[in-house]
Image (cartoon, helix red, strand yellow):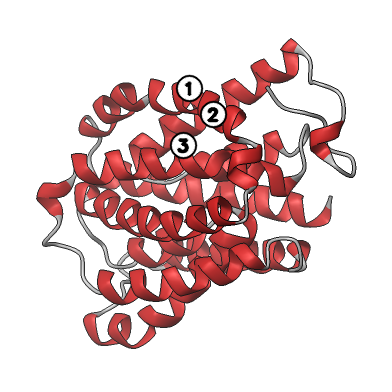
Amino acid sequence: MFHCANGNSRDLRAVTTTEVAIVVLAILAGSLVKSVTGMGMPIIAVPIMALFVSVEDAVVIIAAPTVALNSWLCWRERLHRHEPRDLGRLAAFGIIGAVLGAFLLAALPERVVMAALAVMVMAYVVRFLAAPDVRVGPATSARWSPAVGFAAGVSLGSTGISGPIVATWIHAYRLSPGAHIFAVTLLFSISGFSQLSVFVADGRLFDLGAQAALIFIPAFAMVPFGGALRRRMSGETFDRAILAVLSASAVALMVRAVS
């Protein structure tokens, strides 16, 4: 399924059945979390996959399944499409950032990016816990959404991860659970398509197409269970789930930054 990463990850040994099982379990866990909160699969799966392939290959392999999953979740919550705001600005600048980030995938100082994301996310979580009513108003979101969209796109293109930025920003809008998931998965889908187009154009997706195709099965396997679980959640429980995922992502990012 994959090849061990140490230099050119595509030329080394095939991984063991146990290692494949670990990757599949990571994808299943990420799919469940994503189906509930709208985020979580790359932040869970990429670090696990990076134990057996290079980070660059892990980002490429998971790109297409993640775009497909985001698109499906966005369509499922389409009745909430009129609730979020600033999605046009966030998406437009996210596309620009994702294309740039995909070209810079092998050049950006990943540890610095990971550490900065971790600090930013934890700062938001701490502030929210201290003041649960904190929210981003229309004037503030209109002013800063281009910068947020661009930063999220660059992060996605260069590391395969934009969830911490997007989910942190959208959570501060204080939307309903359905609207939150619609907003974040729409933005993930748009920027993800931009990233994917770069991987297609430079041939990286074709090199790893078979591995990417295998990810689709576990990626979609948990969607029905996640949807059913989310429908049973209250708004407060959903907030707690989002904060839990954000906190976990910050820890994972920091571990990845220092390892």
Q: Secondary structure at mark 2?
A: helix
Circles 1 and 3 in contact, beta carbons < 8 Å:
no
CB within 8 Å, label 2 to label 3: yes
For residue 121, side relative to residue 240 (left or right) = right
User: Which marked residue is nearer to the observer: mark 1 or mark 3?
Assistant: 3
Q: Residue at x 51, y 66 (%)?
A: 98
Crowd rating for badge 2 (residues with CA inside 10 Å; few <14, some 14–19, many 20+): many
The residue indicated by pointer 3 is: 65
Could you say which is closer to the camera, residue 90 or residue 128?
A: 90
Give the amino acid type for the residue marked by disc 2 in the picture.
Answer: Ile
Q: Residue at x 43, y 35 (%)?
A: 33
Q: Nearer the viewer, mark 2 or mark 3?
A: 3
Q: Circles 2 and 1: CB distance less than 8 Å?
A: yes
Location of residue 191 (image quadrant): bottom left
Residue 223, percent from left and from top: 34, 27
Q: Nearer the viewer, residue 250 or 45?
A: 45
Is residue 54 something that shows in the picture? yes
Residue at figure coordinates x 76%, y 36% from the top left: 53
Kindly tell me whether residue 122 is visible in this rendering: no
- Horizontal and vertical percent position of residue 226: 33, 28
| Separation of residues labelled 2 and 3 (CA atoms) | 10 Å
Query: Which tag, 2 or 1, sits closer to the chain's start?
Result: 2
Q: Position of residue 246 (x, y in %)?
A: 50, 52
From what the image shows, is residue 236 above or below residue 49?
Answer: below
Counting residues from the start of the chain, the first of labels 1 and 3 encountered is 3
C-alpha distance separating marks 1 and 3 = 10 Å
Distance from the alpha carbon under mark 2 to that under mark 1: 6 Å
Per the image, the residue denoted by label 1 is 218
| Residue type, mark 3 in image | Pro
- Residue type at mark 1 is Pro
Image mark for residue 27: 2
Q: Residues within 10 Å of mark 3 (few under 14, many from 20)?
A: many
